[in-house]
Image (cartoon, grey):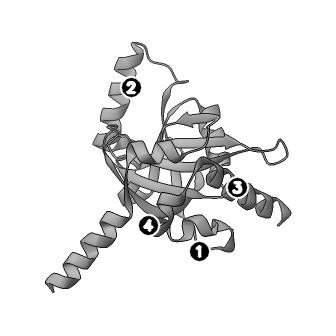
C-alpha cells in the first residue's frame, strides 16, 4: 500500500511544473488574460489558445465544475471561448509566484459561456471575486464583470501532438518553437476537417 501511494505521489510530481518555467516555455502570446494564453497563427487560422494556466484562487469552480472565470467584457469572453474551441494543454495550480506548482491536467476545450442566470454565479466564492473586481474598478460596470466559461476535457485525439501526449516526460524538451509547431499542426488539421 505504501509503495502504491509513493508511486502516485511521484506521478503527481512529474506532471507538476513551476509557474515560471511553464510561462517561460510559452511562445510570444498575442493575448494573455484570465489564464488563457493565445497565439496568432496565420490569418486564415486565426488566434488560438496555446495553454490554459488556471490559478484556482481566480478560478474556484474549475476543478469541481470545469468552469473558468473570465474577467472582462462579453466580447473578450467570446474571443477567448472561440480561441479555446480546439483544445489546449491545461494546468491547475495556486498562486502567481514563479515557484508555484502547476499540475498538467490534460487538454481542455471551451464548451460555451454560461448564462448569467446560472446558479454558479450565486456561489459565495464567485460573489467574493465579483466584489473584489468591483472594488478594484471603484464603479459598477457591466462591461467589466466575471463571466463563466464551461470547459470540457478533450477526448484523446491524433491532433494533440506528440510533444504533449506524454507531458510529464516531454516537458523539458518543450520550447516556444515546439509550442508553435504543435499549434500550427492542430489548427491546420482542424481547418482541413
Identity of the residue drawn at 70% across and 55% down = 181
* Mark toward the start of the polypeptide (3 vs 4): 4
Q: Nearer the viewer, mark 1 or mark 3?
A: 3
Q: Is residue 66 above or below residue 170?
A: above
Q: Which residue is mark 4?
A: 168
Disc 2 or 1, which lies upstream in sequence? Answer: 2
Which secondary structure, mark 3? helix
Residue 46 is situated, as x and y percent measured from the top left of the image, at 77, 44
Using the image as rendered, state which of residue 42 and residue 141 is in the foreground: 42
Q: At 59% from the left edge and 54% from the top edge, which residue is drawn? A: 110
Q: Earlier in the sequence, mark 1 or mark 4?
A: 1
Q: Secondary structure at mark 2?
A: helix
Residue position for label 2: 133
User: From the image, which quarter does the C terminus lie in?
Assistant: bottom right
Give the distance between the C-alpha atoms of the residues marked 1 and 3, in whole angstroms: 19 Å
Numbered circle sitting on residue 156: 1
- How far apart are the alpha carbons under marks 4 and 2? 35 Å
> At 44% across and 54% down in the image, what residue appears?
91
The image shows residue 111, relative to residue 10, as above or below, that is above
Measure the alpha-carbon separation of dots 2 and 1.
36 Å
Most extreme residue toward the top is 138
Amino acid at each position: 500500500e505504501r509503495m502504491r501511494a509513493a508511486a502516485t505521489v511521484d506521478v503527481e510530481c512529474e506532471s507538476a511544473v513551476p509557474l515560471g518555467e511553464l510561462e517561460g516555455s510559452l511562445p510570444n502570446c498575442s493575448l494573455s488574460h484570465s489564464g488563457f494564453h493565445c497565439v496568432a497563427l496565420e490569418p486564415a487560422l486565426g488566434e488560438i489558445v496555446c495553454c490554459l494556466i488556471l490559478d484556482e484562487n481566480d478560478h474556484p469552480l474549475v476543478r469541481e465544475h470545469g468552469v473558468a472565470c473570465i474577467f472582462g467584457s462579453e466580447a473578450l469572453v467570446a474571443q477567448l471561448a472561440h480561441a479555446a474551441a480546439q483544445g489546449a494543454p491545461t494546468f491547475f495550480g495556486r498562486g502567481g509566484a514563479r515557484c508555484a506548482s502547476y499540475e498538467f491536467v490534460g487538454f481542455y476545450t471551451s464548451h460555451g459561456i454560461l448564462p448569467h442566470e446560472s446558479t454558479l454565479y450565486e456561489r459565495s466564492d464567485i460573489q467574493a471575486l465579483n466584489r473584489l473586481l468591483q472594488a478594484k474598478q471603484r464603479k459598477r460596470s457591466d462591461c467589466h464583470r466575471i463571466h463563466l466559461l464551461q470547459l470540457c476535457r478533450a477526448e484523446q485525439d491524433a491532433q494533440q501532438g506528440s510533444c504533449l501526449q506524454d507531458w510529464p516526460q516531454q516537458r523539458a524538451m518543450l520550447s516556444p518553437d515546439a509550442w508553435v509547431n504543435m499549434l500550427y499542426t492542430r489548427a491546420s488539421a482542424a481547418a482541413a476537417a
